[in-house]
Image (cartoon, rainbow, N blue to C red):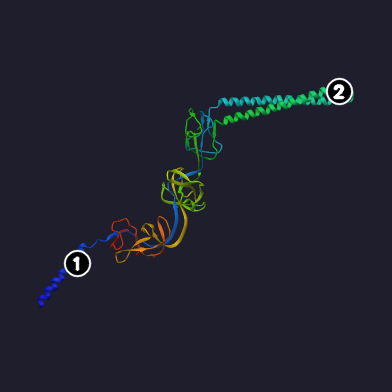
Amino acid sequence: MPVLIRRLLIALVIIAALAAAFWWFTRPKPIAVVASEIDRGTVEASIANTRAGTIEACQRTKLSTIMGGRIEVLDVKEGDRVKKGQLLMKLWNDDQQAQSALALTQVATARQRAAEACAQAANAEREAERQTALREKGFVSASREEAARTEAEARRAGCKAARADVVQFEAKVAATRVEQGRTVLYAPFDGIVAKIVGEVGEYSTPSPPGVPTPPAIDLIDDTCLYVEAPMDEVDAPKIRPGQPVRISLDALPKQSFPGKVKRVAPYVSAVEKQARTVDIEAIFDDPKAPGKLLVGYSADIEVVLEARENVVRVPTAALLEGGRVLVADKDGMLEERQIKAGLSNWEYTEVLEGLEAGDRVVTSLERAGVKAGAHYTLETGTTDKR
């Protein structure tokens, strides 16, 4: 009997060992997950532009002469810095200069004639007064006095006519200067010459209405820059001038610069079908912080609508639909937990209920097999402060 019991016990041990081995080799393998430890910090509600924005200059003008002509003088080249009022380009205008010289000569001649006519008028006035005095003494007749006064009035009229001729020719000089102004370009402000279309000797054509002709000179004031970016029309009512923003540039990766909303466009742009946006403008708090920027750089604007500090927060990448997360418990299994969320952005979401600082949540939700009840192992490099 004892032998039978001993054999039975040995058989049970063997069966248990086989069952344990079967379970060991057929058990589900733990899933490697990336987890992040819940902490306290700042959470912001923010919105960003729908398409890439652009660095723009506060002053930029594309200059063209009012009339066409052959380029005679080109005093600048691309990249030159110029001062306000500096001559940039002049077309051939010898004919207009000749007209101006003629008008100046006519002014000088008219002034001489006016001086002569007015001197004669003064003499005639004095003669009329002398004839009046003689008539009162009975030395001359009344008709003689009347003739002297008539002569004086005629001379006065001649003086006024001569002075009117001077004004007329001066106006002609001004008109010729206006015509010459149609053939020259001066810098309207201090800036840098970005682009020149044309060379000395070539014909420069102004842009007629409705015809997009390239400007002769593109002038930029690069001392004052701002960012213009399109925002979805749904977000536009939330944006106001003065709100804080973060500006990032493709040319300066992994950096952002604080700024403020300067302007919100008062209209909606329909650039593409079904895509309606509102352009906003933002300026840097410290224009020197990003260093040398080029007009035309692509830039993004993130408008900070609200911020809360020292709150429990969870990476937004860890959220499932319906405000659920997978918590990596100490027993090696994933547990689904419902949370109550507050402020949120693409990086963090405020947790009002459901999690505490120190809990670990899974952020690699896209991996196969990551679900509640699954066994897990933390992947090397995961965020784990325990």
**Residue under circle 1?**
20
Q: Left or right of 75: which side holds 26? A: left
Q: Amino acid at mark 1?
A: Ala
Q: Amino acid at mark 2?
A: Ala
Q: How many marks?
A: 2
SS for callout 1: helix
Return the residue found at the far right. Answer: 138
**Residue 160 against residue 345 in the figure, above or below:** above
Return the residue found at the far bottom. Answer: 1
Q: Nearer the viewer, residue 216 or 255?
A: 216
SS for callout 2: helix
Residue 229 visible in rendering: no
Quadrant for the C terminus in the image? bottom left
Q: Nearer the viewer, residue 381 or 138?
A: 138
Residue shown at 12%/76% (left/top)?
5
Q: Who comes first in sequence, dot 2 or dot 1?
A: 1
Q: Percent position (x, y) of residue 134?
A: 87, 24
| Dot 1 alpha-carbon crowd within 10 angstroms: few under 14, some 14 to 19, many 20 or more | few
**Residue under circle 2?**
142
Return the residue found at the far front. Answer: 274
Residue 104 visible in rendering: yes
Quadrant for the N terminus in the image? bottom left
Query: CB under 8 Å between callouts 2 and 1?
Result: no
